[in-house]
Image (tube, rainbow, N blue to C red):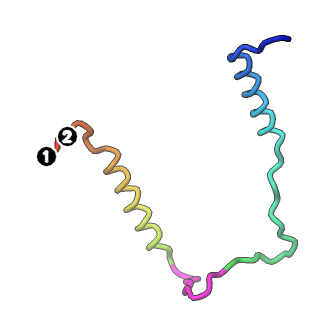
Amino acid sequence: MMRLRPRKLFRLGFAAVVLAALLAVPARAANDDEEEKVFREPGIQYVEEGRPYIQWISAVLMAAACLFIAFKNPHRSHLD
């Protein structure tokens, strides 16, 4: 019986995963009707017209907070 070395086994597994990913067919959404079906949560008021400035402001603030935390000095002491 032939023993597979770990490196060869890794390459074989990697090739199998890549091949499976390339051959996988994405599932299509079941949308048989021509009209688009959109789920609307009951009890929430939706604004159909206008500019989505609230979403943009919240996204910018979240990105700024993430960047602020990411670039903090990691060598600061507890005495700062």
Who is closer to the viewer here, 58 or 44? 44
Per the image, is 48 magenta? yes
Q: Describe the element under mark 2 as helix, strand or loop.
A: loop
Q: Residue furthest left?
A: 79
Against 33, is 12 above or below? above
Against 37, is 16 above or below? above
Against 35, is 73 above or below? above
Who is closer to the viewer here, 76 or 9? 9
Q: Position of residue 35 (x, y in %)?
A: 80, 78
Q: For residue 54, which quarter of the picture?
A: bottom left
Q: Position of residue 59 (x, y in %)?
A: 44, 63
Who is closer to the viewer here, 27 or 2? 2
Highlighted range, magenta:
40-50
Q: Position of residue 27 (x, y in %)?
A: 81, 56
Residue at position x 69%, y 17% from top? Answer: 6
Query: How many numbered tags mark residues here?
Result: 2
Residue at position x 78%, y 12% from top? Answer: 3
Against 28, is 68 above or below? above
Per the image, is 7 magenta? no
Q: Are marks 2 and 1 in contact (CB under 8 Å)?
A: yes
Mark 2 — residue?
76
Mark 1 — residue?
80
Q: For residue 63, which quarter of the picture?
A: bottom left
Q: Amino acid at mark 2?
A: Arg
Q: Amino acid at mark 1?
A: Asp
Q: Describe the element under mark 1 as helix, strand or loop.
A: loop
